[in-house]
Image: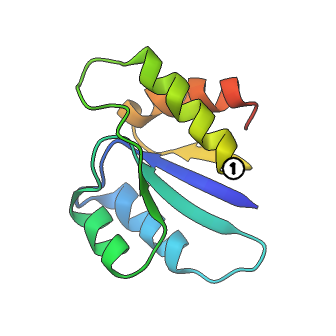
Amino acid sequence: MKIMHVFISMPVGGAEDLVMSFLRAKDERMQPEAVCLREPGVVGDEARAAGLPIHVQPVARRKQFNPFGMIRFSRWLREQNVDVVHSHVYNSHQYAVPAARLAGIP
């Protein structure tokens, strides 16, 4: 099962630490990955350097919601064959929830 954790960016914080523990865990049944919608941030950069699956899809470049970016993100989620989308903070919810619904992903 491929689970995509969605962030705008991954600065130092609790949600980022939680997802890092998911990414490091080894379980054949789950394939956790993370995507940042603006930039990887400090934690994202460290995770990428460690070879962990951190993607960047720059669809939220500004603070104002980008509906076309959300549609592009939805297409990307489908292309990645994601089974579950999980967002962790309010700003990422604005993109993750409608994009996942549009792509038919829980």
Q: Position of residue 24 (x, y in %)?
A: 51, 80
Q: Nearer the viewer, residue 73 or 106?
A: 73
Query: Does residue 38 appear left or right of residue 28 in this picture?
Result: left
What residue does disc 1 label?
82
The vertical placement of 21 against 84, above or below, is below
- Label 1: few (<14), some (14–19) or many (≥20) C-alpha neighbours in 10 Å: many
Q: Residue flagged by tag 1: what amino acid is it? A: Val
Q: Secondary structure at mark 1?
A: loop
Residue at (48, 57) in percent of width and height: 34
The quadrant of the rendering that contains the C terminus is top right
Query: Does residue 20 appear left or right of residue 71 in this picture?
Result: left
Residue at (58, 46) in percent of width and height: 86
The quadrant of the rendering that contains the N terminus is bottom right
Quarter-wise, where is residue 52 in the image?
bottom left
Quarter-wise, where is residue 91 in the image?
top left
Q: Position of residue 51 (x, y in %)?
A: 42, 79
The vertical placement of 40 against 17, above or below, is above
Asked which colour scheme the image uses, the reply is: rainbow
Q: Nearer the viewer, residue 9 or 80?
A: 80
Residue at (75, 79) in percent of width and height: 28
Residue at (70, 80) in percent of width and height: 27
Quarter-wise, where is residue 10 in the image?
bottom left
Q: Position of residue 103 (x, y in %)?
A: 70, 30
